[in-house]
Image (cartoon, grey):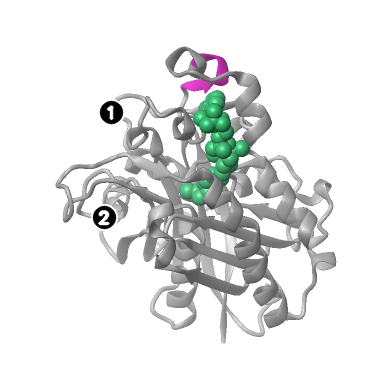
Amino acid sequence: SIRSVVLGCGGYLPEKVMTNAELSQLVETSDEWITQRTGIRQRHIAADGELTSDLGTRAARAALEAADLSADDIDLIVMATATPDNTFPASAVTVQQALGMNHGAAFDVQAVCSGFLFALTTADALIRSGQARRAVVIGAETFSRILDWEDRSTCVLFGDGAGAVVIEGESLPGWRSDRGVLSAHLRSDGRFKEKLFVDGGPSSTGTVGHLRMEGREVFKHAVGMVSDVIEDAFAATGFTAADIDWFVPHQANIRIIDATAKKLGIPIEKVIRTVDRHGNTSAASIPLALWEASTDGRIKRGDLLLLEAMGGGFTWGAVLLRW
Ligand code: ACO
């Protein structure tokens, strides 16, 4: 059998930073309210003309460089995004073109904030079935383009960015066979789709629409759903919270992150947190967190990582990964 091993990780954040103080000039809010309720202090905002595929391409290039590989060496691009450049084609093919790659396959995956875990699981499945050998898995978003900048209950929460990993199929038993994606668990439940959605789209309104969210409702479900799917991952592998070196949650809200870690019994020193500086970057948040914490030396080869996310749909999931 085959296992997908991470060879490199990259990320990209747009240059422009928007602080809570700047936001309080746009809507009736304050740094104190935003920081206390969410832990967010600032977020990055894509420049005019800077598209999701541009962010994704930069993150993909950085991940390939970290892996010491070029686009010639990969045969699959799976990009998670809920904010594609266009309704179609998939933004992943624009990334493919930008990388100068015209072999293999590229496509988008849509699971909103859980998108990176859905994309990683999809790429891992294609690798393990022998249909791909090496993949770039990207999470890239420009949520600033779908926010209602007059709605203070949502516009303060999100930011733009992209992260990516390169994964490669490793035959088992092999010299790296203790590493890679160990177990992946995905869930969704459409009964909750009106709790967090965009009120437009090609088949409904013919417009792009804006993000709408019942924040309290999302909050209420988040910790329980995520904990359940993590329990599934533990049950499938025999690992427990005590085995986890790094907890890498989707970065939506510091209170959700801390409550989940507490419920699982994972000490706060083992939690990777970027939400204070990035805001909620949806599908980009987990690969950005991986990029930051592997670049600054916290995440090391051989560390056991627990990734989790929950988002619109609802969708949610957990992945156990040996770095
Ligand atoms: N500044 C100041 N006041 C505000 C703001 C703001 N930016 N936004 C809302 N308020 C006000 C509300 O109007 C309300 O006032 P009222 O009591 O006079 O009506 C008051 O603050 C409380 O509002 P709530 O929405 O009840 O505040 P809550 O404590 O629930 O916090 C928040 C809101 C931060 C959105 C919280 O519910 C939350 O984090 N929910 C989860 C959202 C989330 O993480 N979503 C993403 C997950 S999925 C994904 O990543 C796509």
Helix, strand or loop at disc 2? loop
Q: Quadrant of ligand 1?
A: top right
- Name the residue rendered at 73%, 51% in the picture: 259
Q: Nearer the viewer, residue 172 or 213?
A: 213
The foreground one among 96 and 270 is: 270
> Residue 316, can we see it?
yes
Label 1 is placed on what type of residue? Gly
Ligand 1 within 8 angstroms of badge 1 C-beta? no
The image shows residue 312 at horizontal and vertical percentages of 44, 55
Name the mark on residue 49.
Answer: 1
Residue 17 in magenta?
Answer: yes
The residue carrying pointer 2 sits among few (fewer than 14), some (14 to 19) or many (20 or more) residues within 10 Å by Cα, namely some
Residue 319: percent from left, percent from top: 61, 67
Magenta-highlighted residues: 16-22
What residue does disc 2 label? 90
Please give the name of the residue rendered at 62% of the width and 45% of the height, measured from the top-left corner: 289
* Badge 1 element: loop
Hey, what amino acid is under mark 2? Ala
Can residue 224 be found in the magenta stretch?
A: no
Q: Is residue 208 above or below residue 165?
A: above
